[in-house]
Amino acid sequence: MALGVTGYVILAVLALTVVAFIAAKARAKSAAGGDVRLLHSLPNYYGYNAAMFTAVPALGVLVIWLMAQPMLIENAIFDRLPDHLIEDGFSRNLMMSDVRRVAEGLDVAVSAGAMTEERADRIRTEFSDVRSILGSVGVALGSDVRPEVLSAAQQYRKSSAIGMGWMTGVVLILAALGAFVSVFVSGADFRARNVVERFVLSMLIVAASLAILTTVGIVLSMLFESLNFFRMHPWTDFFFGGQWAPNFRGNSDLSILPLLWGTLYISIVALMVAIPIGLFAAIYLSEYAGPKVRAFAKPLLEILAGIPTIVYGLFALLTVGPFLVSIFGRGEAGLLGVDWMSGATAVLTAGLVMGIMLIPFVSSLSDDIINAVPQAMRDGSLGLGSTKSETIRQVVLPAALPGIVGAVLLAASRAIGETMIVVLGAGAIAKFSLNPLEAMTTITTRIVSQLTGDTDFASPETLVAFALGLTLFVLTLGLNVLALYIVRRYREQYE
Amino acid sequence: MNDMRILERDVDAKAIKIAARNVQVFYGDNHAIKDVDVDIEDKTVTAFIGPSGCGKSTFLRCLNRMNDTIDVCRVEGDIAIDGEDIYDKRVDPVQLRAKVGMVFQKPNPFPKSIYDNVAYGPRIHGLAQNKAELDEIVEHSLRSAAIWDEVKDRLSAPGTGLSGGQQQRLCIARAVATQPEVLLMDEPCSALDPIATAQVEELIDDLRQNFSVVIVTHSMQQAARVSQKTAFFHLGNLVEYGETGTIFTNPVDPRTESYITGRIG
């Protein structure tokens, strides 16, 4: 029983698929009398066609069945659970997970030989200690099994077994039917090639729509949780309040504005680091560097983009922060002899490190954009007797400007959504301040802190994370759309 | 080719503007130009003709050292403008290019206004003392490129919004504005329709009054219409150089005859 019913069904479908492939190919060949030139398609196409008609509908039904069956059974069982159990303070989910756990335990006990199938169906808490029997086969339960839960679990097992039986039948019949029909039609005139082509097309469409549907799903889930939040907390306080002071006893001030300020301030510092350095690096690489330097320097610069952001966070916390403190802090012992900075976490710490992280974004995109400026522009300017830097400043950069703006906006949306660097480097204090040496906090760090630890998903203090996430999503989406719009308009100019 | 105005041609000997001796050009290992000797006269239109890849554009780009911008390109031999070797170490190629203007195959106006396109060179080289002088240079250049009347009401409109022929004349105005002594044109009409071509050709004939013009062209009719001297390039060699009328009616070299009669090319 190592494989389970589902495993055997899948194996059977795959075996049928192989058989269908070989049979369809052979049938097509014999239909052509051994001369494959008489066939509409190459023999393999008949095989592929048969294989996909055998496997795809059967496996598709299998997947849907596996997802739907537990939900249906749980709903049915839940209706039968006596109401007083739920009133006792058990939430529906906890109750159902108990039922599932007991049902699994019974399965394990049966397969380990601790009880017979019949006994598992009939066992009663009144007569035997279910908890210790299950414990003896390695299934630990948190408390004694209630009779209602046990009977629900038995019901669960019974329904599952029936469902599995039906599933096996339906899937195997579908596979056999697909195999039979597709092998049967594999004659010389059947356009197997075109059918396979359409199948490939539909697979690609499914892949694309899955990606889109997932995005829609994420947005919808955030939207619903945000609506829950706004039912408990006034939206005016969220958008227009001035305080961020979550308090798990209730009555918190949950305003996005101080967090938004921290986010924007750190992003601006980061962009002030990343834009000049990235842009100058891009200009050097695209206009001045020889092919050898370029082949070596560009990948090296792009390695920066591959460093995990948590590593940047460590760098901020352990290297950049203390370094800044040694300059701006410690009073007399510091380099400047001032005491402006007390801790390693500050806007400047996070901003500097995030700026370093963004350099490859700006430089790599700008490099591509500068390279896309036609050589004819440079020739025209050089031919008039201007130097290389005059040409870059007055012709190349103005021509590339829209694209560079797009690159900067993409980097900005990356900065606003960045999490790990600010979690470690920026601090946790929400406030409005212009001092870059003070600790501040961002939207992303607050999402992390509201959702980690003991959380109650019914309180506004937790649900606010979804509203914050949605706002962040809207913000970065807007920036990305704007950036893509600008870049696209720019591209039309030359192609 | 009845429109060759042999009789109208000014056949008086003129001052030599550019003297090239024993010029070799290499692209990496490829020997693109071999032993080219040519004397280009002042206030004359000289046409370079020849089949594709024969090296005529490459040679043209040697005359203002535009080949310096290509890494693998190497030039040997002597090229002198007004007796001064332009490949001498003391010569700044950037200054040289101000003296030897260039118009390219495809119109390449900068993404700026018409005015700024023309004012680009004078601004870089500091040719104007003040705005009024700059205005004057711009107007004069646009007039000499025969495009003033078409653009005088929209000098602040982007140069890229003009038609192809207008763009090319704008590029000529841009080259004229730096007050060069020689104007190099690399197939200036190959991207233009016949009407725009006729306008540019007429313009080239006018420019001869003030500049030495060197034009590379694919069209033998164009060479015959606009030039006084013609050089025929073939496979990197200068095959024949002389009066345009002579080249087209009485060529010495059999390869020249084959080309102009359409047997090679």
Image (cartoon, coloured by chain):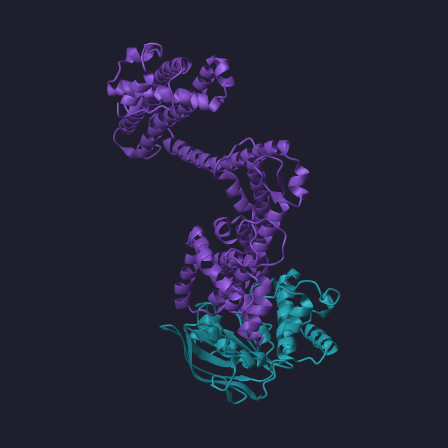
Chain colours: A purple, B cyan
Q: Nearer the viewer, residue A11 or A417?
A: A417
Quadrant of the snapshot with the C terminus of chain A? bottom right
Residue at x-position 70% and y-position 74%:
B138
From this view, report whether residue A248 is shown above or below residue B45: above
Q: Is residue A6 visible?
A: yes
Quadrant of the snapshot with the N terminus of chain A? top left
Residue at x-position 61% and y-position 77%:
B5
The picture places residue A404, in percent across and down from the top left corner, at 56, 59
The picture places residue A269, in percent across and down from the top left corner, at 57, 58
The picture places residue B216, in percent across and down from the top left corner, at 53, 73
From this view, report whether residue B34 is shown above or below residue A64: below
Q: Nearer the viewer, residue A154 or A83?
A: A83
- In this rendering, would A360 be left or right of A184? right
Q: Nearer the viewer, residue B171 or B227?
A: B171
- In this rendering, would A246 be left or right of A313? right
Q: Is residue B105 visible?
A: no
The picture places residue A407, in percent across and down from the top left corner, at 54, 56
